[in-house]
Amino acid sequence: MNPTDEELAARAAAGSRPAFEELVSRYSLRLFHFLRSRSQSDEDIEDLVQETFLKAYRNIGRYDPQRRFSTWLYTVAIRLSISRQRSRRERPLPLDPEGAEHTSPGPQESLVRAEETRAAGNIWLIARTMKPSEYQVLWLRYAEEMPVKEIARSMKKSPVGVRVLLHRSRMKLGKKLREPSPTAGLAEAAAVEHRLSIL
Amino acid sequence: MKCSLHRWNISKALDSGEPLGRLTKLHLVDCEACREFLRIGEEMGRHLADDASLLLGDAKPALNNRVQQALDEPWKPASTPPLSRPKLWQLRPVLAAAALLAVVGVSLIWMVRPRPAGMPELDPLLQLKTGRANLISMLQRAESPYQKEISELRKTIQSTADYLASRFDTSLGENNQ
């Protein structure tokens, strides 16, 4: 029988490196998708995932095994993500326009990405075009199947605040699924129609 | 308004997994839009869960390896790089300028400083006493001419009175006799 996350975390806290490596293999992809939002490139997200695990590894002694490991790990990830966003806002723009790095996509790029997501047909690709907090609350609720109380702990919000955010995010996602694409071709229009018929 | 309240209750039930309240259930019987809201909410939840498992099915071994490698690297606490010390001879002009500025500043302050009066500061109580004495002497000086005149006038009146009295006594004696 496979050990639970909490058991592995307890072993890692006792100094077991393989136990932590097992946690890395269980959570790296989940964290990667969780941290995906419209304003970050895949490279940035991979950096953030790596940073999250490093921070978790160094602070594993602080983890309370009575609580869910995923809640603790996602809390670390959210904090790092927020501090990275802040530092990015504070960072001055480079003077050389050629050397400038476009971390957030422009409107045209966003549109193209939205079209790709429609074609791919995965609902999470459409959810990714929402605000990071809206995307993340949906991920924790539906991909991680976390109860509202745990989500509130991870996101440092009140349970009522999480319920409101979930309610709004679902409404917004429903609206996004219904709205027709401005540049959709016949095939995409058919895909949207198909999705609407499912919903 | 009524529908938004029931939709909030539906949303709450979707998140908690608890059954819907009696009033919301009654409302759903009559409200087609809210029934649709519930159906879409449930369907969307299923889609989100299913599509998440699809996403998580695609393994990303490169990411795993990257994290494992990062864990192998020795951890160094973040520290600020030590500041390089400039050589003393490079600082000579700066030090000379600073010394000159200091001398000019001190002499300027010396020149414009407020100068104290010649007399040393007195104790406030002593100052009060001296003031009083000065005032009395001034008053005395102011009164002295009048005082002199008054005393002379008094003397004159006295002598006049004496004279009149002596004259009166004589005449009285004379009359009695």
Image: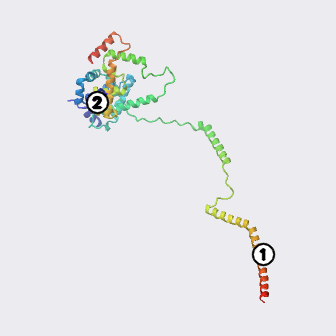
Q: Mark 1 points at which residue?
A: B156
The numbered disc on residue A108 is none
- Closer to the camera, A111 or A18? A111
Q: From the viewer's perspective, tell me whether residue A147 is left or right of residue B103.
A: left
Above or below B171: residue B79:
above
Residue at the spot x=58%, y=38% of the render? B88
Do marks 1 and 2 share a subunit? no
> In the rendered image, which quarter contains the C terminus of chain B?
bottom right
Badge 1 amino acid: Thr
Q: How far apart are marks 1 and 2 (CA)?
A: 129 Å
Q: Residues within 10 Å of mark 2 (few under 14, many from 20)?
A: many
Q: From the viewer's perspective, tell me whether residue A54 is left or right of residue B9.
A: right
Residue at the spot x=76%, y=68% of the render? B145
Q: Quadrant of residue A119 in the image?
A: top left
> In the rendered image, which quarter contains the N terminus of chain B?
top left
Above or below B2: residue B135:
below
Residue at the spot x=31%, y=15% of the render? A192
Residue at the spot x=75%, y=68% of the render? B146
Farthest left residue in view: A1
- What colour scheme governs how the chains and residues are painted in the rendered image of this protein? rainbow
Expressed as whole percent of the image width and height from the top left, the position of residue A26 reads 28, 27
Asked if residue A31 shows in the view, the reply is no
Expressed as whole percent of the image width and height from the top left, the position of residue B109 reads 65, 46
Q: Quadrant of residue A55 in the image?
A: top left
Above or below A40: residue A60:
below
Q: Mark 1 lies on which chain?
A: B
Expressed as whole percent of the image width and height from the top left, the position of residue B85 reads 53, 37
Asked if residue A155 shows in the view, the reply is yes
Helix, strand, or loop for circle 1?
helix
Q: Mark 2 points at which residue?
A: A23
Is label 1 in contact with label 2 (beta carbons under 8 Å)?
Answer: no
